[in-house]
């Protein structure tokens, strides 16, 4: 690990020193009722930071086997250094792609390997004259059909740390069908060394292969090839992104002031200490221009901390409300972009919450390309919060459950030609099937499947999980349902598209505290798409993933309702929402 002095001087062209000076005052804590709690955990956070900078796994565990695993997951701390040394390769590669006439890049990935590039695309956008980036992390047939690029001018990034993830591999097989014999020239692999994907990409002569260090976990990979290859292809200022990342590492080095004053450690202290005090609903407040960043934070926090019955529940995408719609389980983190008119519009809401003594953390983003620093800030903060919660923030022990359950269903489909039949607990008009987990059924005591929301108690959260495509009207109905639950129950609410959330917040749902109440929605697609080389289609895969996760929630004794729609129709979603909300007491 380089010292702050090394970081400030080794890459003069990246202007790290000036960027560091701009980052040091960017974190402000207004802890309100959490003041004493933060003070009591400050020394522990400082010790954790010192251990993190030594890459010492004792920070998170005293078990030798766990320490060995953690030691192989700390490469993200030096990844910005590696990328600084490879900027020329990234820029030269991207220039060749553009000069060869490619107009679009389709990223085939899941979870951490795809969300960081999507944030960069949504916040910064492709530079004029550079390829457009399309992120495809769905098995929904409508989502796949929405990627309507010209294959002959499209580059496909097959992005997978393990190289065996079913979603990107199935999508790659689908898009390969539309290319002629030189199809491999349209594919680039981003993966770890020694994976089947790395071997295949070399054997089949992909256009290029970017081998990422294997000691970087997927959700900590934003400042590695997984994030920066797509950034370079969009023509973004990669040197600036890397420079900001190095500047945050320099600004966050422990030993200079208190933990609370450290721009990254202070955030981790607030998150971890708040969660230990019962404020485990980390509520992100962001201007519209930065809301995509909330999705990346959501997956980082949820997958890193949600295990062993504990965890932080990240809340992204909720509209800011009056103090009366919130319980006492919230910590608010507000990210501000200088010069944003939308920020001024939020000041009144934020002021009211502060007057109500809601605890706040406020972060200033000096400029959009400082996202490079924010990736590092939140990675460090998550590691510190994990230490305070006494968990390993670098594994994901429950993610495999849903994968295994999905595989069992697909094996059944391949041998029998159909998925196992399910007898619903209730059927609504329009043939909408409602099925409860055993834990939900027991708690409802015969009230009926549509009463699932009545099981929400103080301190619980609501998770809306939807296996549907990118239909704006459908999205509006889902958002309206989510927000109505928040306003009617004061519960924190999460929303996730499947199967994306399986690789992020899904870990929290099964491994975190048993305080979630879930409504999982699947729908029969209007048009299905076959998967080359498989006996099942994308529609079958998507349904198996939804049902597999529902089975995992059932095994984990979670309160959950599976809603299956005969089609992805917004009116059917509204019907379900109305039926479920009708069982709640009137406000």
Image: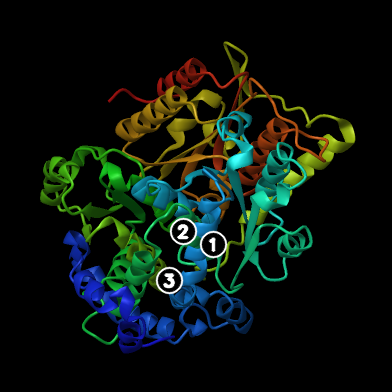
x and y percent of residue 565 in the render? 60, 21
At mark 3, the secondary structure is helix
Mark 3 or mark 1: name the one nearer the start of the chain.
1
Q: Which residue is mark 3?
A: 383
Relative to residue 575, is residue 42 depicted above or below? below
Choose the circle earlier in sequence order: 3 or 2. 2
- Secondary structure beneath label 1: helix
Say above or below: 202 vs 40.
above
Q: Could you say whether the residue bearing mark 2 is in a helix, strand or loop?
A: helix
Residue sitting at the far top: 429
User: Which residue has dot 2 on it?
Assistant: 232
- Camera-side mark, 3 or 1: 1
Image disc number at residue 314: none
The residue that label 1 is drawn on is 93
What percent of the width, then of the height, locates residue 392?
A: 52, 71
Residue 76 appears left or right of 423: left
Q: Are marks 1 and 2 in contact (CB under 8 Å)?
A: yes
On the image, the x and y values in percent for residue 331 come to 28, 55
- Neighbor class of circle 3 (other Cα within 10 Å; few <14, some 14-19, many 20+) is many
Q: Looking at the image, is mark 1 or mark 2 earlier in the sequence?
A: 1
Confirm or deny contact between disc 3 and disc 2 (CB under 8 A): no
Q: Residue at x 26, y 76 (%)?
A: 40
Query: Which of 547/527 is in front?
Result: 527
Give x and y (percent) for residue 201: 72, 60
Q: Give neighbour class at mark 1: few <14, some 14-19, many 20+ (Cα, 10 Å).
A: some
Quadrant of image for the N terminus: bottom left
The answer for how far apart the CA atoms under marks 3 and 1 are is 33 Å
Q: Position of 584 compared to 55: left or right?
A: left
């Amino acid at each position: 690990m380089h010292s702050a002095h090394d970081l400030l001087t080794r890459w003069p062209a990246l202007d790290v020193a000036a960027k560091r000076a701009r980052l040091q005052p960017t974190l402000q804590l207004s802890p309100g009722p959490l003041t004493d709690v933060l003070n009591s955990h400050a020394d522990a956070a400082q010790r954790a930071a010192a251990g993190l900078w030594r890459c010492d796994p004792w920070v998170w565990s005293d078990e030798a086997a766990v320490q060995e695993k953690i030691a192989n997951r700390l490469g993200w701390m030096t990844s910005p250094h590696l990328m600084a040394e490879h900027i020329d390769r990234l820029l030269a590669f991207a220039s060749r792609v553009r000069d060869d006439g490619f107009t679009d890049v389709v990223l085939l990935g899941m979870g951490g390997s795809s969300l960081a590039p999507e944030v960069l695309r949504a916040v910064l956008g492709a530079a004029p004259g550079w390829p457009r980036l399309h992120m495809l992390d769905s098995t929904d047939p409508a989502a796949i059909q929405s990627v309507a690029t010209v294959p002959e001018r499209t580059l496909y990034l097959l992005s997978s740390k393990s190289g065996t993830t079913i979603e990107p591999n199935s999508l790659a097989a689908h898009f390969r069908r539309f290319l002629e014999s030189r199809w491999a020239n349209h594919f680039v692999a981003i993966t770890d060394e020694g994976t089947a994907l790395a071997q295949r990409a070399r054997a089949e002569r992909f256009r290029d292969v970017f081998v990422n260090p294997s000691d970087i976990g997927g959700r900590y990979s934003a400042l590695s090839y997984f994030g920066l290859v797509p950034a370079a292809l969009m023509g973004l200022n990669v040197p600036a992104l890397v420079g900001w990342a190095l500047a945050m590492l320099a600004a966050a080095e422990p030993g200079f002031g208190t933990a609370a004053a450290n721009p990254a450690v202070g955030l981790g202290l607030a998150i971890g200490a708040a969660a230990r005090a019962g404020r485990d609903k980390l509520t992100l407040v962001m201007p519209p221009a930065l809301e995509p960043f909330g999705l990346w934070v959501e997956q980082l926090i949820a997958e890193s901390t949600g295990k062993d019955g504990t965890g932080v529940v990240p809340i992204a995408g909720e509209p800011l409300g009056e103090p009366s719609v919130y319980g006492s389980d919230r910590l608010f983190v507000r990210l501000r972009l200088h010069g944003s008119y939308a920020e001024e519009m939020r000041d009144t809401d934020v002021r009211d919450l502060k007057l109500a003594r809601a605890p706040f953390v406020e972060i200033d983003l000096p400029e959009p390309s400082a996202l490079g620093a924010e990736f590092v800030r939140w990675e460090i903060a998550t590691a510190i919060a994990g230490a305070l919660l006494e968990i390993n923030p670098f594994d994901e022990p429950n993610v495999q459950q849903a994968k295994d359950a999905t595989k069992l269903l697909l094996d059944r489909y391949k041998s029998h030609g159909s998925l196992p039949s399910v007898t619903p607990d209730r059927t609504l008009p329009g043939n909408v099937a409602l099925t409860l987990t055993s834990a939900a059924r027991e708690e409802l005591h015969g009230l009926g499947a549509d009463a699932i929301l009545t099981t929400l108690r103080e301190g619980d959260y609501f998770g809306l999980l939807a296996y549907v495509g990118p239909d704006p009207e459908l999205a509006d109905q889902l958002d309206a349902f989510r927000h109505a639950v928040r306003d009617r129950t004061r519960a924190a609410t999460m929303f996730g598209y499947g199967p994306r959330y399986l690789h992020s917040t899904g870990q929290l749902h099964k491994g975190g505290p048993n305080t979630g109440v879930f409504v999982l929605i699947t729908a029969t697609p209007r048009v299905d798409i076959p998967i080359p080389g498989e006996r099942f289609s994308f529609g079958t895969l998507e349904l198996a993933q939804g049902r597999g996760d529902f089975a995992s929630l059932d095994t984990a004794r979670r309160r959950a309702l599976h809603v299956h729609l005969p089609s992805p129709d917004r009116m059917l979603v509204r019907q379900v929402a109305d039926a479920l909300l009708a069982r709640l007491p009137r406000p």
